[in-house]
Amino acid sequence: MEDTMTTHVKVEKEADLEKLISDYGPSKYLDIVRAMQWARHLRRQEEYRNVPMAELIDRALFDVVSGKIKIAEIEAAVTADQALEEKLFSKRSDEPRKPRVVKEL
C-alpha cells in the first residue's frame, strides 16, 4: 500500500511541476538552466549521490519554479562548485601517464 501512496504523491508532484512550468513567465528557459545547475549541485551532496539524475532534475525544477530555492543560492552553489572543480583540476598532473610495461610470459 505504501508503494501506491508513494506513486500517487509522485504523480501529483509531477502534475504540479508540469502546471508550474506551463504557466511560468518569460524567464522559463533561463530558470530551466538554473534548475540543471542546481541538480548538478545536488548530485555533489552526499545525501543525493544515489538518487537517479532524473529525480534530481525533477526536484531541482520544482525547487526553482516554485521559488523554494532562490537565484542567489543557486549562483553561490555554482560558484562554490566551480571553485572545487578548479581546485581538483589543478591537483591533477599535466604530464601524460607512462604506459605500463607488460611482461610477456
Image (cartoon, rainbow, N blue to C red):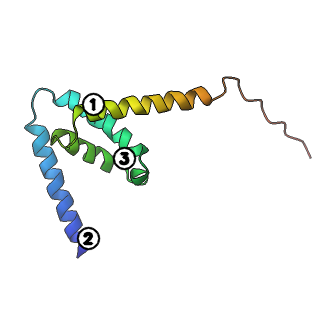
Dot 2 falls on a residue whose secondary structure is helix
Place of residue 34 in the rendered image (x, y in percent of width and height, measured from the top left): 27, 32
Task: Tell me the residue that label 2 is attached to.
Answer: 3
Residue closer to the observer: 90 or 6 = 90
Q: Residues within 10 Å of mark 1 (few under 14, many from 20)?
A: few
Q: State the mark number for residue 1.
A: none
Q: State the mark number for residue 53.
A: 3
Q: In the picture provided, is 63 more to the left or to the right than 93? A: left
Q: Is the residue 16 above or below the residue 21 in the image?
A: below
Measured Cα–Cα span from mark 1 to mark 3 = 15 Å
Kind of residue at badge 1 = Val
Q: Earlier in the sequence, mark 3 or mark 2?
A: 2
Q: Residues within 10 Å of mark 3 (few under 14, many from 20)?
A: some
Residue at the extreme left of the image, as rendered: 23
Q: Earlier in the sequence, mark 1 or mark 2?
A: 2
In which image quadrant can residue 94 be found? top right
Task: Tell me the residue that label 1 is attached to.
Answer: 33
Measured Cα–Cα span from mark 1 to mark 2 = 32 Å
Residue at the extreme top of the image, as rendered: 94
Confirm or deny contact between disc 3 and disc 2 (CB under 8 A): no
Residue closer to the observer: 84 or 56 = 84
Place of residue 15 in the rendered image (x, y in percent of width and height, measured from the top left): 13, 51
Residue plotted at (16% across, 40% down): 67
Q: Earlier in the sequence, mark 1 or mark 3?
A: 1
Dot in front, 1 or 2: 1
Kind of residue at badge 3 = Met
Place of residue 73 in the rendered image (x, y in percent of width and height, measured from the top left): 28, 35
In which image quadrant can residue 12 be found? bottom left
Q: Is the residue 17 above or below the residue 33 in the image?
A: below
